Image: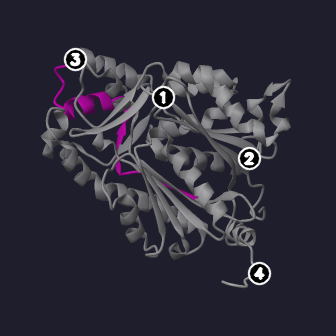
Amino acid sequence: MAGATVTVEEVRKAQRATGPATVLAIGTATPANCVYQADYPDYYFRITKSEHMTDLKEKFKRMCDKSGIKKRYFHHTEETISRHPEFLDRALPSLGARLRTTADAVAELAAAAAATAIAEWGRPAVDITHLVVATNSGADEPGADLRLAMLLGLRPTVRRTLLYLHGCSAGLVAIRVAKDIAENNRGARVLVACAHAVLLSFGAPDEARLDALVTTALFADGAGAVVVGADPTLPVERPVFHFVSSSQATLPATERTVGITLGESGVEYGVSTEVPTLVRDSIERCLADSLAPLGLANARDGGGWNWNSLFCAVHPGGRALLDSYEAALGLDARKLAASRHVLAEYGNMLGATIIFVLDEIRRRRQDGGEERENCRWGIMSGLGPGLTVETIVLHAAGSRNED
């Protein structure tokens, strides 16, 4: 390129988007198999052949009663478990069978959510330039990202990123990655898909593993998808939320508080009972550190943060966690109404759950709730292994013509 007059800075500027990354569409999906939480203790102890464990069943029933969940959806059925007795015995290797059983299901569930998002977006699937897939229900490569690209008919040149085992924060991690892609690649349209199937961690109840019993009372299957892009093309593309900033903070000395282990008998989740207390003691500082560099003076009240001036998209890891957010931030009950609604209707679908919450907030704002005109700034927050706090600052689009 001898004699070229273009500079590196000019090329870099031309490659980048002008505006912030924006949610252009949202889609969600669940499997057909629905189990009501009130019936789940009987269902679970029956299909795991554990009805003789009466004391543990009563303890599990109390967990379910206090969970704040009304119903959950699962890909696996009673017939699935009966065909695989190795799923019930942690001493038996079962990882391969679990992965084979969930591989297509995760991709198909993600495709259902993605198809809904793409239809709302209004452009053909072949216009997707990047694909970010997050799941806790896989360990193979090629994985759910390639399967999903084929199911949706994406171009062979679509740039794929596959994220495994980020737990409840997987949706926020995937969106953070999509934000950076969209803002650093002019014209990029990023499809984010998060899908989860609990079969990789499913097992019989064990008195020695009460943390597994807690997650069994909470976790469910589901998928969420968003189309992310900067500089929307009006009027076809309609911005919903702008992603203003993203951040991550790992609480000191908490690396054994939340963990995910992949082994011969599947996936094991370790969740300490200290998590709600850690959140109550630390979450305000984490969120304040995310907001402070933005200079949002209107969110302050008497020198502190007025959290009720923001809308809140909090990942509902469980009722106790939502209670901790509410207490630590001094939130009005209505601020976490969307998160509590999603928890009640679907349970904790790990990474996909935050997309359901975002969709529910969108719906409530369209209906005139959440102080629609006076509450344009928001925070999206979720917890991951570490204990790690993921935060994304949002700004709600005011109308279909806002860029």
The N terminus appears in which quarter of the rendering? bottom right
Instruction: Provide the residue designation for mark 1.
Output: 68
Between the residue at mark 2 and the residue at mark 4, the CA separation in whole angstroms equals 53 Å
Of the pair 172 and 213, the residue shown nearer to us: 172
In the rendered structure, find residue 368 and report the number of the disc placed on it: 2
Instruction: Provide the residue designation for mark 3.
Output: 54
The image quadrant of residue 297 is top right
Helix, strand or loop at mark 3: helix
First to last magenta residue range = 26-53
Q: Is residue 144 visible?
A: yes
Going 26% across and 32% down the picture, which residue do you hit?
44
Of the pair 229 and 79, the residue shown nearer to us: 229
Between the residue at mark 1 and the residue at mark 3, the CA separation in whole angstroms equals 23 Å
Counting residues from the start of the chain, the first of labels 2 and 4 encountered is 4
Mark 2 residue type = Gly
Q: Is residue 333 visible?
A: no
Counting residues from the start of the chain, the first of labels 1 and 2 encountered is 1
Helix, strand or loop at mark 4: loop
